[in-house]
Image: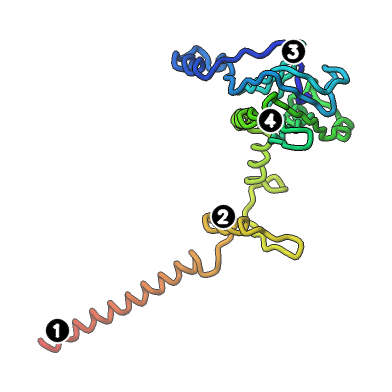
């Protein structure tokens, strides 16, 4: 599924105040609550590279930008527009290049396929080989450069509400499953070589992890097991000492008698 979905009407949305009222009234289903609009900017110019087939060969359109909590929406003055799901936006930033200040976005055209939401039941091995990560660039130019920060902040806030589920799954797999599909039994420590070197921040993070991670399968010499033996040895020495002291007391009592 492409990152851009053509639309002819703007999705229903409410203001933050209306959203608070709806939530406070305890609706029958929270799934029916409309999206909240975080920013609306009129008279913006957008450009797509490469151009989208829904807009013909023209990659530039003028219209209104809607930053909703659900999707990013653009509606042109001609009555046609598009929406973008936030996980498909792999990068957004404020650009102040030679072409003028703008909001620059990179869109992942393979987002839907990567998350298993593409149309159809899925292709074969040939489709997987032909599927190349395609990126589309989106530039948003407001009429006033003073609106850039407000658009960027709203976009960042809404994007944070939609983390990529594929990234979360990958993080969990990397954390708990090894290459053989089983849980790892040891921790590997990065020692570095001539081609790899951790930064100062990386070394500090690694030291912190090593200080809080306990590995019961890789005991250090002299720790736990050895420590128990040493404690037992101390107890034995104490036992002998106490026994000797007790015997000395008995001998002194016998002498007095």
- In front: label 1 or label 4: 4
* Residue at x 41%, y 70% (from the top left corner): 231
Question: Which numbered circle lies on residue 209?
Answer: 2
Quick one: quadrant of the N terminus? Answer: top right
Residue position marked by numbered label 1 in the rendering = 253
Find the distance from the CA under tag 4 to the CA under tag 3.
27 Å
Of the numbered discs 1 and 4, the one sitting upstream in the chain is: 4
Q: Residues within 10 Å of mark 2 (few under 14, many from 20)?
A: few
Q: Farthest residue in the bottom direction? A: 255
**Spatial CA span between label 1 and label 3:** 111 Å
Direction from residue 147 to residue 244 in the image, left or right:
left
Q: Seen from this angle, which residue lies furthest left? A: 257
Residue 116 % position (x, y): 74, 27
The percent coordinates of residue 29 (x first, y second) are: 52, 14
248 or 145: nearer the viewer: 145
Q: Earlier in the sequence, mark 2 or mark 1?
A: 2
- Say which mark, if any, is on residue 77: 3
Who is closer to the viewer here, 122 or 100? 100
Mark 1, Cα crowd under 10 Å, few <14 / some 14-19 / many 20+, is few
1 and 4 marks in contact (CB < 8 Å): no
Vertical side of 174 occupied by 148: above or below: above
Disc 1 on helix, strand or loop? helix
What residue lies at 52% left-to-right and 19% top-to-bottom?
16
Mark nearer the viewer, 1 or 3: 3
Q: Is residue 166 visible?
A: yes
């Amino acid at each position: 599924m492409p990152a851009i979905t053509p639309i002819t009407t703007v999705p229903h949305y409410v203001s933050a105040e209306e959203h608070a009222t709806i939530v406070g009234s305890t609706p029958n289903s929270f799934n029916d609550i409309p999206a909240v609009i975080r920013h609306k900017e009129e008279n913006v110019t957008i450009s797509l590279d490469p151009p989208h087939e829904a807009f013909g060969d023209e990659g530039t359109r003028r219209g209104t930008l809607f930053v909703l909590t659900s999707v990013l929406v653009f509606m042109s003055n001609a009555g046609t527009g598009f929406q973008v799901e936030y996980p498909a936006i792999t990068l957004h930033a404020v650009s102040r290049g030679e072409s003028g200040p703008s909001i620059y976005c990179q869109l992942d055209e393979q987002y839907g396929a990567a998350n298993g939401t593409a149309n159809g039941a899925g292709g074969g091995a040939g489709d997987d080989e032909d599927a190349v990560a395609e990126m589309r660039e989106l530039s948003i130019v407001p009429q006033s450069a003073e609106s850039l920060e407000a658009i960027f902040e709203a976009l960042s806030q809404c994007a944070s509400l939609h983390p990529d589920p594929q990234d979360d799954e990958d993080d969990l797999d990397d954390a708990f499953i090894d290459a053989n599909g089983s849980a790892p039994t040891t921790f590997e420590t990065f020692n570095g070589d001539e081609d790899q070197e951790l930064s100062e921040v990386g070394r500090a993070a690694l030291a912190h992890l090593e200080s809080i991670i306990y590995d019961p399968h890789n005991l250090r010499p002299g720790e736990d097991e050895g420590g128990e033996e040493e404690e037992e040895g101390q107890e034995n020495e104490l036992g002998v000492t106490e026994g000797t002291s007790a015997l000395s007391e008995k001998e002194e009592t016998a002498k007095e008698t």
